[in-house]
Amino acid sequence: MESNKRGAFIVFEGCDRVGKSTQSNKLFKLLKDKDVAVKHINFPDRSTIIGDLINRFLKNTQDLSNEVIHLLFSANRWERVNSIQEDLLAGTTVICDRYAYSGVVYSVAKGLDMDWCWAPDRGLLKPDAVFYLKANPDQLASRCNFGTERYEKLELQRKVSELFDDFNERESSYWHQFDAFETEQELHSQISTIVEKLLPQVADKPLEKLT
């Protein structure tokens, strides 16, 4: 008989170079090793037509207005929404590096209106958990390769950090904050403990949407 248990939708958020990719990859490997059905994705998804435009913008080879790039980031997430939903309903846990929150905070940090920025992401799938890796952007600037992409500017990252803090406070029912400067293994251990409890908790819950 087919199982109707769904997978968990887990998102990693935070400023650039906080270690989201490292921790999301470690969690992916852990679940895979435990024979949990799992997929790892990240936004922007640079493999699509929209993603290619975003990639050129981020690499500073394409100029677009703040409004246009914001809507492209949102459209890039909408491109994947059906496949994410299918995976979750089939029992696969989806680990996602960056999501709608990143889209909003970077655009608001550049001066756009919060409500306007959030509007195109309403209706996207709501994560079961957001793991927010928090760090002082002044410390992050010394990390390897910082500054190679368009948004890796210290002043912008400071604003982004404050906006992530606001999200964390407002969405505290499913956001989990971690100190990004903890050791890699310590962070992984804390995140794994939460995920272990989360998977059975959400298995019978319906998927929710961002409002």
Image: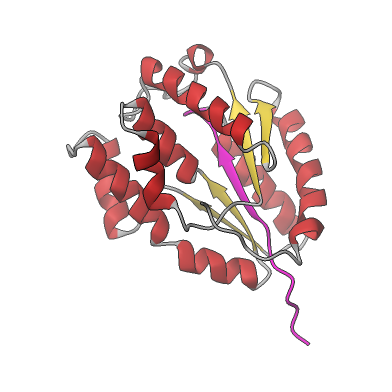
Taking 167 as reference, is 204 above or below it?
below
Magenta-colored segment: predominant secondary structure = loop
Looking at the image, which residue is at 32% across and 59% down?
48
Looking at the image, which residue is at 74% across and 59% down?
202
The magenta span reads: 1-17
Does the magenta portion include 7?
Answer: yes
Q: How many marks?
A: 0
Please state which of residues 148 and 50 is positioned toward the viewer in this rendering. 50
Does the magenta portion include 157?
Answer: no
Taking 168 as reference, is 31 above or below it?
below
Question: Looking at the image, can residue 56 be seen?
Answer: no
Q: Position of residue 89 (x, y in %)?
A: 63, 71
Left or right: residue 160 versus residue 151 is right
The residue positioned farthest toward the bottom in the image shown: 1
Taking 41 as reference, is 159 above or below it?
above
* The quarter of the displayed image where residue 35 is located: bottom right
Please state which of residues 123 and 192 is positioned toward the viewer in this rendering. 123
Please state which of residues 74 and 145 is positioned toward the viewer in this rendering. 74
Left or right: residue 4 versus residue 62 is right
* The quarter of the displayed image where residue 176 is located: top right
Looking at the image, which residue is at 68% across and 51% down?
29
Left or right: residue 209 versus residue 184 is left
Q: Position of residue 194 (x, y in %)?
A: 78, 43
Taking 116 as reference, is 142 above or below it?
above
The colour scheme of the drawn protein is secondary structure
